[in-house]
Image: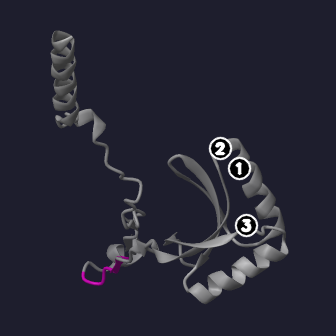
């Protein structure tokens, strides 16, 4: 009986020691979330905007006319603001269906965003919380009673 008790005690101690050891973490298990990275985009005007008056060149060498357009088209940078979330689901098809229904009922921009593991249907590009509250009230009136305000990166008008 003493041998059985000793064996049980040794096995129990071994189990406790093994369970207390720290778990090893593989490099593959560490995944960083890069979905929030949205760089500012600047588009340079690539059209040839150099105009030379060839008639003036042919008549007089010192009266040439040349104009260069050095303007750049700057895309409006995304900024922090608010949207109203009306739906979230695991199914992309269901999210697209709800987004289309919302588009038919409102003039505000509607976005389907994938933020793991959900597809989220969000409405509007509100720069202030008051603007988002007003939009939320309008969506409540359209039957989206679960709508709520979220802080998000918006595309300002």
Which dot marks residue 126? none
x, y (%) of residue 53? 40, 75
Label 2 element class: helix
Residues shaded magenta: 62-69
As drawn, 22 above or below 143: above
First of labels 3, 2 by sequence position: 2
Q: Which residue is mark 1?
A: 96
Residue found farthest to the front: 1
Is label 3 in contact with label 1 (beta carbons under 8 Å)?
A: no
Q: Nearer the viewer, residue 93 or 4?
A: 4
Which residue appears at 70% of the width and 69% of the height? Answer: 147
Q: Which residue is mark 2?
A: 92
x, y (%) of residue 95? 69, 50
Indicate the quadrant where residue 130 lies.
bottom right
State the CA–CA distance, disc 1 to disc 2. 6 Å
Is label 1 in contact with label 2 (beta carbons under 8 Å)?
A: yes
Label 3 element class: loop
Which residue appears at 57% of the width and 85% of the height? Answer: 129
State the CA–CA distance, disc 3 to disc 1. 18 Å
Indicate the quadrant where residue 124 lies.
bottom right
x, y (%) of residue 142? 84, 71
- Helix, strand or loop for the magenta stretch, by majority: loop
Q: Nearer the viewer, residue 58 or 9?
A: 9
Residue found farthest to the bottom: 130
Q: Say left or right for 87 vs 41.
A: right
Q: Say left or right for 73 vs 27.
A: right
Q: Nearer the viewer, residue 125 or 3?
A: 3
């Amino acid at each position: 009986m003493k041998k059985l008790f000793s064996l049980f005690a040794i096995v129990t101690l071994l189990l406790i020691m093994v369970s207390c050891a720290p778990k090893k973490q593989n490099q593959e298990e560490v995944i960083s979330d890069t979905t929030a990275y949205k760089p500012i985009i600047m588009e340079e005007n690539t059209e040839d905007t150099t105009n030379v008056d060839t008639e003036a060149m042919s008549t007089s060498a010192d009266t040439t006319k040349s104009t260069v357009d050095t303007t750049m088209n700057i895309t409006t940078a995304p900024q922090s603001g608010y949207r109203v979330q009306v739906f979230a689901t695991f199914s992309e098809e269901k999210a697209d269906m709800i987004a289309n229904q919302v588009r038919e009922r409102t003039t505000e921009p509607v976005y389907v965003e994938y933020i793991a593991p959900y597809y989220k249907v969000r409405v509007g590009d509100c720069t202030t919380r008051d603007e988002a509250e007003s939009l939320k009230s309008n969506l409540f009136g359209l039957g989206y009673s679960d709508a709520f305000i979220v802080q998000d990166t918006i595309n300002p008008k």
